């Protein structure tokens, strides 16, 4: 798209809110390209809802006897829809064997689904008839309690002028050649829903829409390149015959961040252990994470039987239980890079001379007493080395999170077990954030919004693939814990150009 609308992110970044929502996917005439479906069928609506599309678009005519029906073309099987009675029109079969549905039948199904609706009012023979159709459509949407889930579109200027008098729901004009953004604003419409060919030919119209606060929709986009460009440009809606493909690409596309948006912080999981010469939970992994400019280094601690806290993830090393052996035995064990298992004190002695923040996971010990003793020793050492103000606490243990909150450490406390506590439960137990696995966030799509409403930080673990990192960037997480921190840096830099410079400077300075 003309360098995707003249690199619109650079042009209109100042107009976009800091929490700009990603482009919403609208299934064109429903998900009619799915097996067993058909355009403007009830099945196409149900299929669009089943895949989690944001909205389903459909087309409405009024028959000669005043019944609203769904059909795109004005003609079906030789019958003109607007000059034929509904009993004849609704007896016509769609390609999947369904009868052509009435709007009432369609809405009776839609009311029990989650998907939003984009109702296109088709052109009719006279302005008076178009105004009548607009009123009956709005009345029926209200009757079914679907007003909050419905927006309206039309090629008819008469319809777009009439609808704002009848509803406060969004109204968008479909014909770019006959409706400039300024004209739409003047008549009270809310958006411009133009063909991709028009947006490409007149890219300044997009900028004008943003200046005027108008919604932007682009139709009908069915190829991957245009989809990705539309996501990058920041369209509010994208209408497509292939909503599943669009949804997949949206998750994989790094979106240029709004000007004032905060970038996600990158946490090296168990340090940058995949770097040459490194190992998980080693001092070398901490130093390597700091050297590339990662924001934080995550590490795991256990307390040995003699009260010494050491770094280890599994709780067992070379067949030895960490919490059931003294530190001299555990610290004699070798890591993969040849280092001995480090004590927390050794680790912190190195950390105090670095810039990187620490993300300290206190592991789940066998008794509350052991958990409590480990907490106290960790806090003692962090205070000794003046590192408490650079430390974030995470744990799978409800007890650990509750105790840290009771001690009022005044540092972030994030709970790791998404299947155990909801965001609300984590908040009630003193946590300041939810540090849940990638799969937990995927299975509970409302959790991120609920965290934001609660004022809680969002962390996601453990990311290793490009796709997962991109999804997390676009979701606007606060932290991403990753085994591939340099890849995460590269991808974050695409969305946040200023970050690229910071990373480069940090590498140059050797910090």
Image (spheres, rainbow, N blue to C red):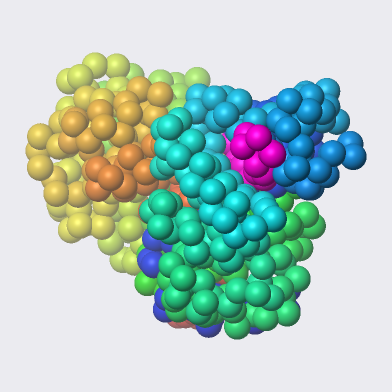
Who is closer to the viewer here, 191 or 128? 128
Q: Position of residue 295 (x, y in %)?
A: 40, 61
Vertical order, 50 against 203 (above or below): above
> In the picture, which quadrant includes the N terminus?
bottom right
Q: Residue at x 54, y 36 (%)?
A: 115
Of 116 and 345, which appears nearest the observer? 116
- 500 to the left or right of 322: right
Q: In the figure, residue 436 lies in which quadrant?
A: top left
Residue 405 left/right relative to 169? left
Question: In the rendered image of this protein, does residue 122 appear above or below residue 368?
Answer: below
- For the C terminus, which image quadrant? bottom left
Q: Is residue 59 magenta?
A: yes
How many discs mark residues in the rendered view?
A: 0
> In the image, what residue occupies the spot 52% across and 77% down?
183
Left or right: where 459 falls relative to 374: right
320 in relation to 346, above or below = above
Range covered by the magenta-colored residues: 50-67
Q: Nearer the viewer, residue 344 or 506?
A: 506
* Residue reaching furthest to the top: 367
Rendered position, 508 above or below 319: below
Question: Farthest left residue?
Answer: 407
* Residue 487 visible in this rendered orientation of the protein: no
**What is the x, y in percent for residue 346?**
32, 50
Is residue 429 within the magenta segment? no
Residue 366 seen in this snapshot: yes
- Work out which residue is located at the far right of the displayed protein and give it: 78
Residue 344 horizontal/vertical position (percent): 30, 44
Q: Position of residue 186 (x, y in %)?
A: 45, 75
Residue at 79%, 57% in the rendered image: 223
Q: Residue at x 15, y 53 (%)?
A: 384
């Amino acid at each position: 798209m003309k360098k995707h609308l003249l690199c619109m992110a650079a042009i209109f970044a100042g107009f976009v809110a800091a929490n700009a929502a990603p482009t919403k996917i609208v299934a064109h005439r429903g998900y009619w390209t799915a097996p067993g479906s058909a355009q403007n069928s009830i099945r196409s609506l149900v299929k669009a809802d089943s895949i989690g599309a944001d909205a389903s678009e459909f087309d409405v005519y009024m028959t000669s006897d005043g019944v609203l029906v769904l059909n795109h073309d004005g003609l079906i099987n030789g019958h003109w829809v607007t000059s034929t009675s509904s009993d004849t029109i609704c007896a016509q079969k769609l390609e999947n064997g369904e009868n052509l549905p009435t709007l009432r039948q369609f809405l009776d199904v839609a009311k029990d689904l989650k998907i939003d609706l984009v109702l296109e009012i088709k052109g009719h023979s006279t302005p008076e008839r178009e105004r009548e159709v607009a009123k009956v459509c709005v009345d029926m949407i209200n009757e079914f309690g679907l007003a909050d889930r419905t927006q309206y579109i039309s090629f008819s200027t008469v319809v777009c002028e009439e609808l704002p008098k009848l509803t406060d729901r969004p109204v968008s004009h479909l014909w770019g050649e006959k409706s400039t953004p300024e004209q739409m604003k003047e008549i009270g419409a809310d958006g411009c829903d133009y063909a991709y060919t028009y947006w490409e030919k007149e890219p300044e119209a997009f900028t004008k829409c943003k200046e005027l606060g108008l919604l932007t929709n682009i139709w009908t986009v069915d190829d991957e390149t245009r989809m990705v460009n539309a996501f990058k440009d920041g369209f509010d809606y994208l209408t497509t015959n292939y909503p599943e493909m669009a949804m997949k690409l949206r998750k994989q596309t790094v979106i240029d961040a709004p000007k004032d948006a905060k970038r996600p912080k990158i946490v090296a999981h168990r340090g940058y252990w995949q770097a040459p010469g490194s190992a998980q939970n080693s001092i070398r992994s901490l130093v390597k994470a700091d050297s590339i400019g990662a924001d934080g280094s995550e590490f795991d601690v256990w307390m040995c039987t003699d009260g010494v806290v050491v770094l280890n993830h599994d709780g067992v090393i070379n067949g030895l239980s960490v919490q059931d052996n003294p530190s001299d035995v555990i610290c004699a064990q070798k890591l993969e890079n040849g280092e001995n298992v480090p004590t927390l004190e050794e680790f912190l002695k190195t950390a105090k001379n670095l810039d990187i923040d620490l993300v300290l996971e206190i592991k789940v010990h066998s008794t509350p007493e052991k958990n409590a003793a480990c907490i106290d020793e960790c806090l003692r050492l962090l205070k000794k080395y003046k590192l408490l103000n650079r430390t974030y606490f995470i744990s799978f243990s409800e007890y650990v999170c509750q105790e840290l909150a009771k001690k009022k450490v005044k540092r972030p406390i994030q709970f790791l077990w998404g299947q155990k506590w909801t965001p609300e439960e984590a908040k009630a137990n003193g946590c300041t954030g939810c540090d849940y696995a990638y799969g937990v966030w995927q299975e509970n799509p409302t959790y991120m919004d609920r965290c934001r409403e609660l004022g809680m930080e969002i962390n996601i673990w453990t990311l290793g693939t490009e796709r997962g990192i991109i999804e997390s960037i676009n979701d606007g997480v606060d932290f991403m814990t990753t085994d591939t921190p340099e890849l995460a840096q590269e991808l974050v830099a695409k969305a946040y150009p200023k970050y690229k410079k910071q990373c480069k400077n940090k590498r140059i300075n050797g910090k």
